[in-house]
Image (spheres, rainbow, N blue to C red):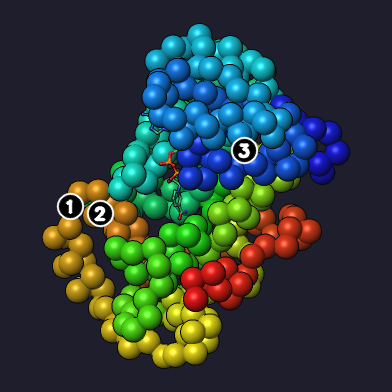
Amino acid sequence: MGKSKVKVLVVGGTGYIGRRIVRASLAEGHETYVLQRAELALQIEKLQMLLSFKREGAHLIEASFSDHQSLVDAVKKVDVVISAISGVHIRSHSIGLQLNLIKAIKEAGNVKRFLPSEFGLDPARMGDALEPGRVTFEDKMAVRKAIEEANISFTYISANLFAGYFAGSLSQMGSFVPPREKVHIFGDGTLKAVFVDEEDVATYTIKSIDDPRTLNKTLYLRPPDNILSQSELIAIWESLIGKQLHKTYISPESFLETLKGLDYKLQVGIGHFYHIFYEGCLTNFDIGPNGQEASILYPQVNYTRMDHYLRIYV
Ligand SMILES: NC(=O)c1ccc[n+]([C@@H]2O[C@H](COP(=O)([O-])OP(=O)(O)OC[C@H]3O[C@@H](n4cnc5c(N)ncnc54)[C@H](OP(=O)(O)O)[C@@H]3O)[C@@H](O)[C@H]2O)c1
């Protein structure tokens, strides 16, 4: 793997995960293109970030989701398209826009692989997810359907839990920093989840783009040392700060009751916690023939362990 360099286009390249994917692609030595949306107008931070990518060797391609031909022209330049378009309701949710990108990829006809914006729970396994959070999975599945109907080759990245969201916070709601006194634990805190440093999400993603073993498959990111229950994650933090936190255990009934009172955007995101921490949806299945596991395919990646990750918060 990694022998020949690939022409890669990142869409959503200034986003939270997108910027890391751009950098990982450059680091791997791929010819990296980043979509510069015509609509950016006065968004100076985004423009500056795009220019910093250009300084690091990326090519910027101007295009717009409302200009089909511009998308066709953009994807014609590359072998692989990676979309990192937004899909977190409390920030922005534009997953459906990828249908325009898929039309362009289909028309262009040259793209060897498309990685849609997934990077989370496997939406194919979330058919019974709670309302209203299921919208995330339904929208991602609609994108998959369009990809497969258009006969576009793909890799789906099931990244599990971004560490910045879920480890830094000890998976508490309403904060991204770990508590120092009290902590809420979902259920009995023993179901296993998977925490992945966002930089590693990007690295594994880039490793997969020219790998025949991930062609038309889902790549699950399950670095073994980061398969942890919420209680295990809390214990890591406690040992780092040398102190035990006061623990409150939340029953599933009480969790669901609280959820009902939240506004729509929070209900979507927090609803996913239920599946992760009360149902164990990240780890309660074996990876079948349509999947691969990233740390097995790429053992050379020295992924960040959560004891190391959490040190910065001490
Ligand atoms: N597993 C996890 O814990 C976890 C956590 C967070 C996110 N995710 C997933 O990661 C993916 C990316 O999320 P993110 O938080 O990185 O996204 P984000 O930073 O909120 O947004 C990514 C990019 O989406 C593009 N975008 C937003 N609104 C747009 C619009 N109206 N028209 C065109 N482009 C638009 C922008 O691209 P430009 O660069 O062109 O401006 C933006 O930079 C999603 O699928 C999300 O579900 C997973």
- Please tell me whether residue 169 is drawn above or below residue 35 in the rendered image: below
Q: Where residue 310 sits in the image (x, y, percent)?
A: 53, 72
Quadrant of the rendered structure where residue 173 is?
A: bottom left
Q: Where does residue 161 sit, x and y in percent of width and height? A: 48, 59
Compare residues 266 and 42 and report the one nearer the observer. 42
Name the residue at the top extreme: 69
Instruction: Determine the residue positioned at 63% across, 55% down.
Output: 200
Q: Alpha-carbon distance for marks 1 and 3?
A: 33 Å
| Among numbered discs 2 and 3, the one appearing first in the sequence | 3
Amino acid type of disc 1? Asp
Number of disc labels: 3
* Front residue (pair 30, 105): 30
Q: Which residue is mark 3?
A: 22
Q: For the residue marked with disc 3, what is the amino acid? A: Val
Left or right: 237 with respect to 300?
left
Q: Amino acid at mark 2?
A: Leu
Q: Which quadrant of the frame does ligand 1 lie within? A: top left
| Mark 1 crowd level (few <14, some 14–19, many ≥20, 10 Å Cα) | few
Mark nearer the N terminus (1 vs 3): 3
Q: Secondary structure at mark 3?
A: helix
Q: Is residue 84 above or below residue 34?
A: below
Look at the numbered disc 2 and say if its residue's Cβ is closer than 8 Å to ligand 1. no
Q: In terms of image quadrants, where is residue 139?
A: top left
Q: Which residue is mark 2?
A: 266
Residue at the spot 58% in from the left edge and 75% down from the top edge: 307
